[in-house]
Image: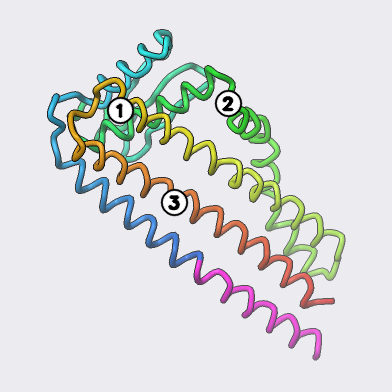
Amino acid sequence: MSGYYGFSMGWYASMILLIPAVIFCWWAQSKVKGNYNRYSQVRNLQGLTGAQAARKMLDANGLHHIQVLETRGQLTDNYNPTNGTVNLSEGVYGVPTVAALGIACHECGHAIQHAVGYSPLKIRNAIIPVTRFGSSLAIPVFFVGLIMSLPGLETAGILLFSFAVVFQAITLPVEFDASRRALIQLKELGIVSDDDEYDGTKKVLTSAALTYVGALLMQLLQLVRLILLSRSRR
């Protein structure tokens, strides 16, 4: 009976822990959507599309071989180091808005990171296979161990999940640095025409970065939750 009571208390305590992370993630997502929706309605003064801004930034950094392509969806923008492409979503690629400038140049920031051998990016790319493997198995392994009272499996699940936490922690400096590079070059290359445009791109990129902070917080609290559940049965 005491074991069941301990498990119940551990379960409720672990669920309560996630509430702040869920609230923060919801707030961060609303900030992203709010700033994106606002500045995707504001035409930039030069009439530059996201694709044109990306091309300008890439060429200025000697990355003439990187292609700028359009990809389907909203906020699906990414840099693919495998095939050397900056992929911009439909609301960024051919659209001359303030939001498009910030997002396009952020992805070019990743391309520059790759070109100069930015260490956190190299580490993140190196652990992706381990992270995917660990993330897919962590929760099933942990709960099999929990249900069958096998502490070894519980520990294995916690260790596997910790890879996802490490990956998310490394992602933070990668994303912040890409935005930093973008903001510098938006001004240096004259892609933004005045302080209002610069402030708009900064708001879009800052709010996007908050989603990564929220993801890390969620992962950390999820890890603490697993540890609490494991200890409540011992």
Tell whether 149 sits left or right of 33.
Answer: right
Tell whether 211 sits left or right of 75.
Answer: right
Give the percent coordinates (x, y) of residue 174.
Answer: 53, 36
Circle number at residue 124: none
Give the labeled residue for mark 2.
118
- Front one among 144 and 60: 60
Q: Are marks 1 and 3 in contact (CB under 8 Å)?
A: no
Q: Is residue 225 magenta?
A: no
Tell whether 26 sits left or right of 151.
Answer: left
Query: Earlier along the polypeptide chain: callout 2 or callout 3?
Result: 2
Circle number at residue 186: 1
- Front one among 43 and 223: 43
Image quadrant where residue 221 sits: bottom right
Q: Are marks 1 and 2 in contact (CB under 8 Å)?
A: no
Give the labeled residue for mark 3.
211
**Around disc 3, counting alpha carbons within 10 Å, would you say few (fewer than 14), some (14 to 19), or many (20 or more)?**
many
Q: Nearer the viewer, mark 1 or mark 3?
A: 1
| Tag 2 secondary structure | loop
Amino acid identity at mark 1: Leu
**Around disc 2, counting alpha carbons within 10 Å, would you say few (fewer than 14), some (14 to 19), or many (20 or more)?**
some
The dominant secondary structure in magenta is helix
Q: Residue at x 47, y 65 (%)?
A: 22
- Front one among 202 and 28: 202
- Front one among 73 and 116: 116
Q: CA distance from mark 1 to mark 3?
A: 22 Å
Q: Nearer the viewer, mark 2 or mark 3?
A: 2
Q: Is residue 74 above or below residue 160?
A: above
Give the percent coordinates (x, y) of residue 65.
Answer: 43, 8
